[in-house]
């Protein structure tokens, strides 16, 4: 894989994106409402003027569409317990109070609760458009073709349809995109060729695949490139108008790929645990990697 050998970098486009049927997990996003406002949230919380709540019929249809999918199905937010309609949710964010009913409804080993209270939590910025900061388009597409999120995270269903990537789904919602694929049986069998239209639409506007510093999720500011500043303005982002967006306009070149401080999570998060069967490997890797310096510091003003 070229990402392990930047020094001998050559333009050889190797598309490593996975067919959706090979994913370990597909998310059903029932809301993007959240009580937190983390920096660089993958759901762009803080930028929406109004959160969405998936209706029950759409949720049921989403579940039906995944019949036969060999991986896991996730129920995701935002903060899913804020959803006022679905039977196991409450409309109130009271995790401790409702933990028993959630544990009765689902296999408790498979409830992933992340309240972002860990002091060392970091997020990689997602609003630095690759096309704004990488002039070399071959390099840009090679990085996108190897995006760590697509390789290790999930496809997603939102009220606007089905998406090959959960970050693309969130971007479509934030920026009033055209929506995803129809949520019908078997949509998850798509190959990279069959979801290339979504890759083309969302990835050049995203920064998950490019080498850019991650920083504390407790910061107030998101890092945003020029064209996404304009897009945030157009959608009247409250976070943008509150001044909580910092411009990132540094050009990224092949040389940057050798800079450990600019590394993406690609370099230091080579594995994602999706269920209990992955936890031993997760803990083994975490122990082996303790002391890693890959996460960068917050930008000024954050
Ligand atoms: S570049 Fe962004 S939109 Fe494209 S696959 Fe990666 S995370 Fe998803």
Image (cartoon, helix red, strand yellow):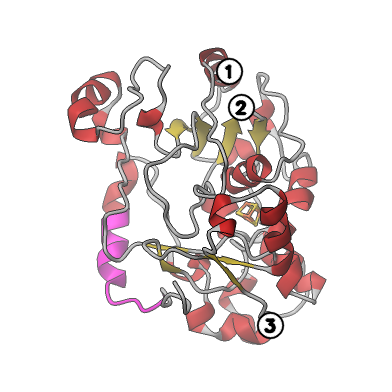
Q: Callout 1 environment at 10 Å: few (<14), some (14 to 19), or many (20+)? A: some
Do tag 1 and tag 2 residues touch (Cβ < 8 Å)? yes
Alpha-carbon neighbours of circle 3 within 10 Å: few (<14), some, or many (≥20)?
A: some
Q: Callout 2: helix, strand or loop?
A: loop
Q: Residue at x 52, y 66 (%)?
A: 266
Q: Earlier in the sequence, mark 2 or mark 3?
A: 2
Q: For the residue labelled by badge 3, is the local secondary structure a helix, a strand or a loop?
A: helix
Closer to the camera, 44 or 138?
A: 44
Residue at x 65% of width, y 19% of height: 185
Q: Which residue is mark 3?
A: 254
Residue 127, image x, y percentages:
62, 60
The CA distance from mark 1 to mark 2 is: 7 Å
Which labelled disc corresponds to residue 4? none
Q: Quadrant of residue 198?
A: top right
**30 to the left or right of 255:** left
**Quarter of the image with the C terminus in it:** bottom left
Please tell me in which quadrant of the rendered image residue 157 appears: top right
Residue 169 placement, left or right of 87: right
- Residue 64 in sight from this viewpoint: yes
Indicate the quadrant of ligand 1 in the picture: bottom right
Q: Earlier in the sequence, mark 1 or mark 2?
A: 1
Q: Exactly how many numbered labels are in the figure?
A: 3
Picture coordinates of residue 19, whole percent (x, y): 65, 42
Q: Give the magenta-colored segment's residue range.
A: 282-294
Crowding at dot 2, Cα within 10 Å, few <14 / some 14-19 / many 20+, comes out as many
Could you tell me what secondary structure mostly forms the magenta stretch?
A: helix
Could you say which quadrant of the image residue 119 lies in?
bottom left
Query: Of discs 1 and 3, which sits in the foreground?
Result: 1
Residue under pointer 2:
159
Q: Which residue is mark 1?
A: 58
């Amino acid at each position: 894989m070229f990402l392990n050998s930047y020094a001998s970098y050559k333009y050889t486009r190797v598309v490593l994106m996975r067919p959706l049927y090979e994913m370990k997990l597909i998310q059903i996003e029932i809301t993007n409402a959240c009580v937190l406002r983390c920096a660089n949230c993958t759901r762009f919380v803080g930028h929406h003027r109004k959160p969405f709540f998936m209706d029950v019929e759409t949720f049921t249809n989403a579940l039906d569409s995944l019949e036969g999918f060999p991986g896991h199905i996730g129920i995701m937010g935002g903060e899913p317990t804020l959803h006022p309609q679905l039977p196991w949710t409450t409309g109130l964010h009271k995790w401790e109070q409702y933990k028993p009913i959630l544990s009765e409804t689902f296999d408790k080993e498979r409830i992933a609760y992340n309240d972002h209270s860990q002091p060392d939590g970091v997020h990689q910025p997602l609003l630095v458009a690759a096309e704004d900061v990488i002039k070399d388009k071959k390099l840009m597409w090679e990085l996108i073709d190897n995006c760590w999120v697509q390789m290790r995270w999930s496809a997603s269903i939102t009220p606007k349809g089905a998406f090959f990537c959960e970050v693309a789904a969130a971007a479509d919602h934030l920026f009033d995109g055209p929506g995803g694929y129809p949520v019908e049986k078997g949509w998850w069998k798509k190959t990279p060729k069959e979801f290339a239209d979504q890759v083309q639409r969302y990835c050049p506007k995203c920064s998950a695949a490019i080498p850019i510093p991650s920083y504390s999720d407790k910061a107030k500011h998101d890092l945003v490139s020029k064209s996404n500043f304009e897009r945030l303005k157009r959608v009247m982002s409250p976070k943008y108008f509150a001044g909580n967006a910092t411009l990132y306009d540094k050009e990224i070149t092949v040389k940057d790929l050798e800079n450990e401080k600019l590394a993406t999570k690609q370099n230091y998060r080579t594995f994602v645990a999706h269920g209990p069967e992955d936890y031993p490997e997760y803990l083994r890797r975490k122990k082996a990697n303790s002391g890693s310096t890959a996460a960068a510091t917050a930008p000024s003003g954050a």
